[in-house]
Amino acid sequence: MKLRLDKKDLKSFLQSLIDQYDLYAPVQLTEGVSVYKKIDRPGEVSLTLLNPQKPLKEIFFPQSEVMFDFEKVGKRNQVTSTEEVKKERVILGARPCDIQAISILDEIFLGKDYTDVYFLQKRKLTTIIGFSCNHPLSTCFCSSTGGSPFFREGADLFFIDLEEAFLVELLTEKGMAFQKNRFFKEADPKDISLAKEIEEKASTKGDASVPIERIEKRLNLMMESPFWDRVHEKCMGCRICTYLCPTCHCFDIVDEALNNRGHRVRNWDSCLSSLYSQETSGHNPRPSGRERTRQRLMHKFNYFPKNFGRVACVGCGRCILYCPVNFDIRQAIELTSPKGIKKEKAEVN
Amino acid sequence: MIQQKIREKAKELLSKKEVDLVIGFVKGTLPLRTTPRFIRNPEKTDRLIWNPFCENNLATYLHKFRQFKVGLVVKGCDARSITALFLEKRFKPNQLFLMGVPCQRMVDRRKVEKAVPGEILHAHEQEDLIIVEGDDFEKALKRDDFLYPSCQACTHRNPINVDVLLGDPVEEFPLTEIHPEVKEFEKKSPEERWNFFEKESGRCIRCYACREVCPMCYCAECFVDSSNPKWIERGLSPSDLQFYHMVRAYHQTGRCTGCGACERACPMEIRLTYLTQKLNQDVKELFAFEAGIDPDTPPPLSAFEIEDRQEFIK
């Protein structure tokens, strides 16, 4: 179903969402840096950056989340579950790559083997309003990873920016609940044709040339390849690419306690840190950047496809944009391909 | 041309097997960027480049190559880091061959990105201008207006204690006051200072990029990673973030060479160098010491002298 929201009504629309739901949208923290945050006033919403630095996963899988509280009372140990999310939530302004990444997290947190109650509860209560990417960046490669600048899967509503208005598509049952929203008008056929034109133009972007097809098979043969000896060298071992990755989902569970009380907390973790694989004995099975970089790429492009039939990368480009030493995952992927190997050899000779 | 000299020297070092590898910069995959490269084959040295986008402090990589002889391309600040690290006995004598490059000051890519209306697709240097192009714009920016704060204030652009200087020394003068950020910070009331620190550290995502890119941060176990004793929790509570940032800065006292790598690496654009600059300034005033200049004098907080000032003991 296609509707229209005039931009002059956007503020009132946002206010109506704030009144009725917990609204989450990109908020600018300082010039050029934004995150998804709970919105109190419409003016806080900032849609200037395509993607906030921190990905959408944070709204479902927070970087640091209390799982439960515990306390020793007399001789008894008392465990109290932390307050669960009860209010319906709306996310506005997420781009197709970030939304696609949530469906990748679904495989993990709501998969065949486990159901994560913390993730599930938030997922159930959240409606996602996706935004089209009319002008993808040069670092975007969603079209190589099974998405596109107008990929709608995972979104409940989809907004296409037509300059003066948004074309609003209602895509799911959750989306259809907005059918009678007082700010939505019937879409004009002109709006629909303009949206189509914008979509066609954008679809040539989002770089489709990164050789991800068959990467799982290629990597099958590469566990002990000398490729890893070199590709990791410039990585300094920080956690930017994993924390800002919309699909990376490793976590570490710790108890924060003092005297007889405390809470159990789940924090994001990163395979690029040496501590990640450090064992109690002191032995570390991934002792250097070589093994850690291999893990990062293998997990995304070999283990994950093996387990779930898709790569754990949506081509958002954050790891490329924010890497302090310009480690470019597109280049690393290319170097595993026959074309890349040839190119590398050509440069040597 | 400096770039040519770097290539020739690197080729010579590798051909004569004077070093096992050379670490320098090659073309990056993004405009306004270069990327570090580890070269072992003398035939590959023609990939090395030099321009005002060679922002990384390559000294940090040396901790990974302690068993090798390394040829390294260094700017003024990188060379100072190495001198400071030598004093901490991180390298064996003759383990390094430093190719010093008088630095033209590095361009602050984020500042450039913020000054143009769209995504930058191409950028290059043309005399004292940076020419940037996007889909529907082209702009010429004066390079000196778009430098990293640490580079603007730099008075050590000529690398010292190096094995060879590639290029003519430049005249040493700062473009701004020496510690402009400290001045700005000191003008604030204690409350305003706290608010500023709280706001900046509050954006931290604990990726530890500031720690990993710093040549002086090489502890086998960082205090934040220690579980016994546990000094700090792993989450994002403001007090933990503040604690991390304070201790990280303090550990640099008398050791920080002010290269600014920490601030450049931060994906959340947290201001960091005003803290280390303040410490640098204090160390200079109290002990007449600047890190990484004198290869024989250890940093004041690592040494004990009977004549040490002790008015602070009351």
Image (cartoon, coloured by chain):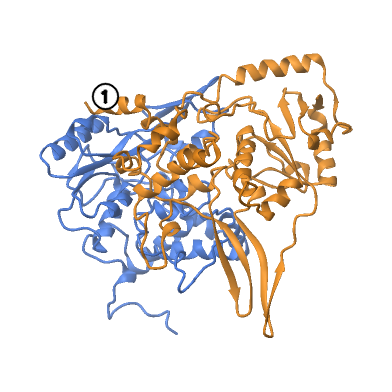
Chain colours: A orange, B blue
Quarter containing the C terminus of chain A: top left
User: In the image, what residue occupies the spot 43% across and 40% down?
Assistant: B147
**Location of residue A210 in the rendering, given as x and y in whole percent from the top left corner:** 46, 27
Q: Is residue B270 left or right of residue B72?
A: right
Quarter containing the N terminus of chain A: top right
Of residue B43 and residue A104, the one placed in the foreground of this image is A104
Residue underneath mark 1: A346
**Location of residue B37 in the rendering, given as x and y in whole percent from the top left corner:** 30, 39
User: In the image, what residue occupies the spot 15% across and 40% down?
Assistant: B13
Q: Is residue B189 visible?
A: no
Quadrant of the image occupied by residue B40: top left
Q: Is residue B110 left or right of residue A289?
A: right
Residue extending furthest left?
B16
**Location of residue A242 in the rendering, given as x and y in whole percent from the top left corner:** 50, 47
From what the image shows, is residue B218 above or below residue B172?
below
Q: Residues within 10 Å of mark 1 (few under 14, many from 20)?
A: few
Of residue B79 and residue B229, the one placed in the foreground of this image is B229
Q: Amino acid at mark 1?
A: Ala
